[in-house]
Amino acid sequence: MFEVITLGSGSAGNSMLVRGTSSAFLVDAGLSAKQLSVRLQACGVRVEDLSGVLLTHEHQDHCGGLKVLMNRCRFPVYCNPLTARAMSDAGFPHANWQLFQNGCAFALSEFTILPFQVPHDASDPVGFRISTRGACLGVLTDLGYATRNVFDVLKGIHALLIETNYDEEMLQRDIRRPWSVKQRIQSKHGHLSNTAAARVVEELHAPDLRHVILGHLSKDCNSPDLAETCVRSTLEARGRGTSVYCAGQDVPSPAFALI
Ligand SMILES: [Zn+2]
Ligand SMILES: [Zn+2]
């Protein structure tokens, strides 16, 4: 068994459950602790059953529920040293840190995890390549653009969670965000637009890529329809066997099986 379920994804919080035959863990814990445990329970997983939580970076929408969740269970928290330091500096209590180095694979139960650096405005943000028994999942969220290294590391994956943060026109038209914020979002250390994500998916596409899960949509500057249409149209010519699903903020996704 190797399956992935997004518990919730969007600007208000992100968390994904990865399940194997004998273990389960989260990638990020940005929903409230209550929602995390309710949604885990709906998937048949107790907080106490988790083998750990992997963190991409220290932004609140990725770790906001972690502190309260850890009151229930002191599972290991996997992140790199700069992310752990940023969280400690921000008042995060002493955790059962399991520190990893970017570019160095490590084992988490039956899984092999390879963290890799991505450009984003956090201390030391990462994506993950997560594999077991020949199947492989890529996690690519919160990045201004995909570097050459990202493409190299994620070559040959079977499923991909990728952010489609904003629609370019909707962001331009948005009257609530000041110019400086728009500049930050669109910068090389910001987020991927729908079209930028579609280009990444196109380049990573291979016959073995079965599932593409779109996530981290901006509530005001995107819609599931726009994001899905943009990625689907790019894949149309080449990816008939690839499913495209847009993860929601408020409900868990179906389970996507890799093996
Ligand atoms: Zn984020
Ligand atoms: Zn972020």
Image: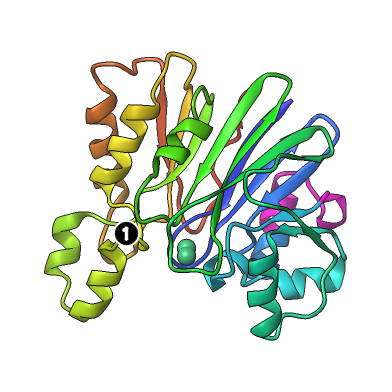
- Residue 96 seen anywhere in this rendered image of the structure: yes
Q: Nearer the viewer, residue 155 or 50?
A: 155
Residue lying at 28% horizontally and 63% vertically, measured from the top left: 187
User: Dividing the picture into quarters, in which one does residue 139 lie?
Assistant: top right
Name the image colouring. Answer: rainbow
Q: Nearer the viewer, residue 2 or 39?
A: 2
Q: Which residues are magenta?
A: 38-51
Which x, y percent locates residue 122? Answer: 50, 68
Q: Is residue 143 above or below residue 82?
A: above
Q: Is residue 140 above or below residue 182?
A: above
User: Amino acid type of disc 1?
Assistant: Lys
Please rate how many residues cluster around mark 1, counting C-alpha atoms within 10 Å: few if below 14, some from 14 to 19, many from 20: some
Residue lying at 26% horizontally and 62% vertically, measured from the top left: 186
- Residue 257 seen anywhere in this rendered image of the structure: no
Q: Nearer the viewer, residue 40 or 101?
A: 101
225 sits to left or right of 82: left
Q: Nearer the viewer, residue 167 or 7?
A: 167
User: Dividing the picture into quarters, in which one does residue 88 lie?
Assistant: bottom right
Is residue 39 in the magenta section? Answer: yes
Residue of label 1 = 188
User: Dividing the picture into quarters, in which one does residue 182 lie?
Assistant: bottom left
